[in-house]
Image (tube, rainbow, N blue to C red):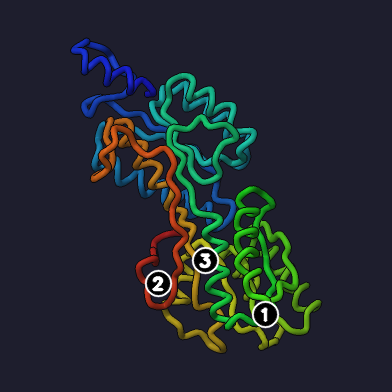
Amino acid sequence: MKKLLVLLLAVSLGIATFAAVPTAQEEMRIGVAIPSADHGWTGGVVWWAKQAIEDWEEKEPNAKFFLVTADGPNQQVGQIETLMVKGIDVLVVLAHQSGPVTPVVEQAANEGIYIVSVDRGLTKPVSDIYIRGDNAGLGRVSAQWMAEELNGKGKIVALEGIPSVINKERVEAFEKVMDQYPGIEILDSQPAYWSTQKGLEIMENYLQKYDEIDAVYAQDDDVLKGVLQAYEESGRDDIKLMLGGAGSKDIIKRIMEDNMEGPDLVRADVTYPPSMIATGISLGVKAAKNETLDGFYQRKLPSDIILRAELVTEENAEEYYYPDSVF
């Protein structure tokens, strides 16, 4: 797959060669290795991967896909090794954990397999394309919206994700914006591991610990669901707004309908789309076909793509609502 440059040189020199990249008439073998649906967002990743594969199978009958899902990094390593035995041309991978998975992906790259890395990235620069959400942007957009909604004053509690580079980028960007608003105080910030149950437990503790809370930043929609449950069960009514993230269909629907009983706590969200795996698969197909993007005049596909963190409100929520998605 990585013999694209050799192919281009050979063509320019008029030399016949057998390229590693399949032509449109040859079978394209594309492996997709992703985590199992262990929470809402990864459930969305699995759904979007299947959707993209189904779409491409209709458009490209010569494309053969191998989709595998893993419960842990060791299982994913074994699955990628099996995909390599199957003779894949392209590997689209969302690493379960970057460290343990990187060596086998590097091995695949060294064997000429085209690598599309999605979301969590790898510990070495071995991918041909790296596509991910804007984690710093998610934290920044969230903080800007919350600060404006609070008119620059209030007490906030925060629930973070899994301690990781991704979480660090989000938290630091959020806090950097809030530092510009001396009237806003972050009372507490704890890891909720992007878990509804952890969100419930931490919010219960916050509600017992702090008599006055104006806003909650949950960073993730799964966590937000636990936060909402804890707040509703507490009987309190002091919180003015709550904000999650990632754009789950349940939260988007709530923003669209704007008819929930009680105060309108959830009126915005910030995207971190699980559909990025579908984009990765599409780019993998284009790479296998030696194609570039429409209107993109360079010879190769972009090597690094960051998807914008977009603010979702009642005005534009319908554009982000996918009712058939599991997330």
Locate residue 316 relative to residue 73 in the image: left or right. Answer: left
Residue shown at 42% from the left, 59% from the top: 325
Q: Nearer the viewer, mark 3 or mark 2?
A: 3
Q: 304 above or below 219?
A: above
In the structure shown, which secondary structural element does the residue marked by tag 1 occupy? Answer: loop
Numbered label attached to residue 183 = 1
Residue 133 on image: x %, y %: 49, 52
In the structure shown, which secondary structural element does the residue marked by tag 2 occupy? Answer: helix
Q: Nearer the viewer, residue 179 or 279?
A: 179
How far, Cα to Cα, is label 3 from label 1?
A: 18 Å
Labels 3 and 1: the sequence-earlier one = 3
Numbered label attached to residue 317 = 2
Labels 3 and 2: the sequence-earlier one = 3
Q: Nearer the viewer, mark 3 or mark 1?
A: 1
Contact between marks 3 and 2 (CB within 8 A): the answer is no
The crowding category of the residue bearing disc 1, from other C-alpha atoms within 10 Å (few below 14, some 14 to 19, many at least 20), is some
The crowding category of the residue bearing disc 3, from other C-alpha atoms within 10 Å (few below 14, some 14 to 19, many at least 20), is many
Q: Nearer the viewer, mark 2 or mark 1?
A: 1
Q: Nearer the viewer, residue 272 or 24?
A: 272
Residue 236 on image: x %, y %: 70, 86
At label 3, which amino acid type do we have?
Val
Q: Which residue is mark 3?
A: 141
In the structure shown, which secondary structural element does the residue marked by tag 3 occupy? Answer: helix
Contact between marks 3 and 1 (CB within 8 A): the answer is no
Residue 112 on image: x %, y %: 43, 21
The crowding category of the residue bearing disc 2, from other C-alpha atoms within 10 Å (few below 14, some 14 to 19, many at least 20), is many
How far, Cα to Cα, is label 3 from label 2?
A: 16 Å
At label 2, which amino acid type do we have?
Ala
Residue 232 seen from this side: no
Q: Quadrant of the N terminus?
A: top left
Locate residue 64 relative to residue 260 in the image: left or right. Answer: left
